Image: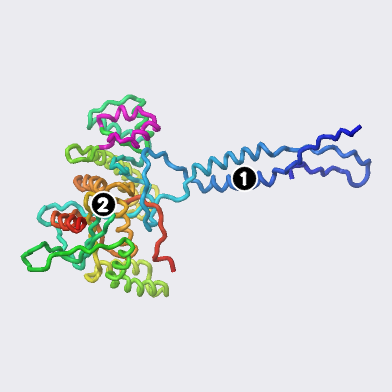
């Protein structure tokens, strides 16, 4: 209590002194001060420490001729991002009337919410492996380092899906970050941003305007 | 005659528990606080599931909603002074002592070299207003005049040298350390702080600048935390 306790020797012998008024300490200014400090700290605090998300971009090719195209990448899934829309196609890109006689590539539209399922289905190989390894890790059959090594191996396997993300001028950063995020959720090992080429851009514009 | 009733004294409220409570909260906030940095430009960062923490040695490029580019970097006063001296020599700009002091104190800068002396004379409040305005005063990144290149090259060089010096000092003091890991930690990392509503090609322009310089193309985007659906089980 705010009153100072009187522990005087009023017990026992001696004359009982008349009870003096105890000094009252007014706590109100102290409350004011405490709340002032409190307000200051509440206002200036940021709780969450900044988190970062790594994205590795392909380095600039030393020689213009060796730009890797999708044809050389096994099991690639290419996402084309534009404002408010996400499209994807599978594997290699074929233009209308290509030399190989393949049917021209068509873009499929997908919602961001559907991307997770698509990637999980396509990356089943890695996700299944991960389950096995995680189980082994849990039972302490393999060490942490072995687990990381095995996972990296699985992600680099031919059967593991690789994701290429291409954007046009209207795509927003949020769409790109969300896409990378989905790749991380689906445990995809190889994903990067690649510059869009003219054929893809034409097809994208044609599909959007349809 | 009616008796004059004595004015009743206001009921005394004991404030002690309230003080206890208030100071408890103050203590909590004081200990958990990490102070908000003074931001020149307001950037609404996107969310991701990544849990990696922000590195200590970094070179940060911010891309605002309108696509304006700002640069910020770690380093103590010495390093920043070194960077400034180098930049002044390369770009032939002249700064007053006061402007130089503002350069060292600034967390982020966004101005062309030509306007830099004037920009550094502004108060941080005025810089914020300029960053919010439609006026395209920021670091030029277009192919005709890419000043970000000069910035990145100069800043990286100085940060890297500083990192190496600290690395050697640490290794000399504690020989038992994991040298490979430590050297990696001391290297400046590239941070991208892009607004979630910024058109992505502005970010790509920044990345291409790094590519043109033959630098490492590993970037870290600053993101706010989001729940990881893989862990919801």
- The circle on residue A171 is 2
- The circle on residue B22 is 1
Q: Quadrant of the N terminus of chain B?
A: top right
- The circle on residue B157 is none
Chain identity of mark 2: A
How far apart are the two marked residues, 2 and 1, measured between alpha carbons?
A: 48 Å
Q: Is residue A87 visible?
A: yes
Q: Quadrant of the C terminus of chain B?
A: bottom left
| Residue at the extreme left | A99
Q: Quadrant of residue A185?
A: bottom left
| Number of disc labels | 2
The one of B137 and A54 positioned closer to us in this rendering? B137
Is B122 within the magenta?
yes
| Image: magenta residue range | B113-139
Please provide percent x and percent y for residue A18: 90, 38
The local crowd at label 2, few if under 14, some if 14 to 19, many if 20 or more residues have their Cα within 10 Å, is many
Q: Is residue A72 visible?
A: no
| Residue at the extreme front | B1
Q: Quadrant of residue A26?
A: top right
């Amino acid at each position: 209590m705010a009153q100072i306790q009187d522990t005087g020797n009023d017990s026992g012998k001696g004359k009982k002194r008349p009870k003096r008024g105890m000094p009252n300490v007014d706590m109100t200014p102290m409350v004011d001060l405490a709340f002032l400090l409190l307000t200051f700290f509440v206002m200036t605090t940021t709780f969450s420490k900044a988190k970062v998300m790594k994205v590795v971009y392909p380095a600039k090719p030393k020689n213009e001729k060796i730009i890797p195209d999708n044809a050389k990448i096994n099991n690639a899934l290419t996402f084309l991002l534009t404002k408010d829309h996400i499209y994807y196609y599978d594997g290699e890109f074929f233009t209308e009337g290509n030399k190989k006689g393949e049917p021209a590539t068509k873009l499929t539209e997908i919602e961001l919410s559907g991307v997770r399922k698509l990637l999980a289905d396509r990356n089943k190989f890695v996700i299944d492996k991960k389950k096995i390894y995680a189980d082994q890790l849990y039972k302490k059959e393999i060490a942490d380092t072995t687990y990381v090594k095995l996972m990296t191996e699985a992600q680099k396997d031919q059967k593991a899906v690789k994701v290429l993300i291409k954007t046009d001028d209207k795509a927003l950063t949020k769409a790109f970050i969300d896409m990378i995020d989905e790749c991380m959720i689906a445990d995809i090992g190889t994903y990067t941003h690649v510059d869009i080429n003219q054929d893809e851009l034409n097809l994208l514009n044609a599909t959007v305007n349809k | 005659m009616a008796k004059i009733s004595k004015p009743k004294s206001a009921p005394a409220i004991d404030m002690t528990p309230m003080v206890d409570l208030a100071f408890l909260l103050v203590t909590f906030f004081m200990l958990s606080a990490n102070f908000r940095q003074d931001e020149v430009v307001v950037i609404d960062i996107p969310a991701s599931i990544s849990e990696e923490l922000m590195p200590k040695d970094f070179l940060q490029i911010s891309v605002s909603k309108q696509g304006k580019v700002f640069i910020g970097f770690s380093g103590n006063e010495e390093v920043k002074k070194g960077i400034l001296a180098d930049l002044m020599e390369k770009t032939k700009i002249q700064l007053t002592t006061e402007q130089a002091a503002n350069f060292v104190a600034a967390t982020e800068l966004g101005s062309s070299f030509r306007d830099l002396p004037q920009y550094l004379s502004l108060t941080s409040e005025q810089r914020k207003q300029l960053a919010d305005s439609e006026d395209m005063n920021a670091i030029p990144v277009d192919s005709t005049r890419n000043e970000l290149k000069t910035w990145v090259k100069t800043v990286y060089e100085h940060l890297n040298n500083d990192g190496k010096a600290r690395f050697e000092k640490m290794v000399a003091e504690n020989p038992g350390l994991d040298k490979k890991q430590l050297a990696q930690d001391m290297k400046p990392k590239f941070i991208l702080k892009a607004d979630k509503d910024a058109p992505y090609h502005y970010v790509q322009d920044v990345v291409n600048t790094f590519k043109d310089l033959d630098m490492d193309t590993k970037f870290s985007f600053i993101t706010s935390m989001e729940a990881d659906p893989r862990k919801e089980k």
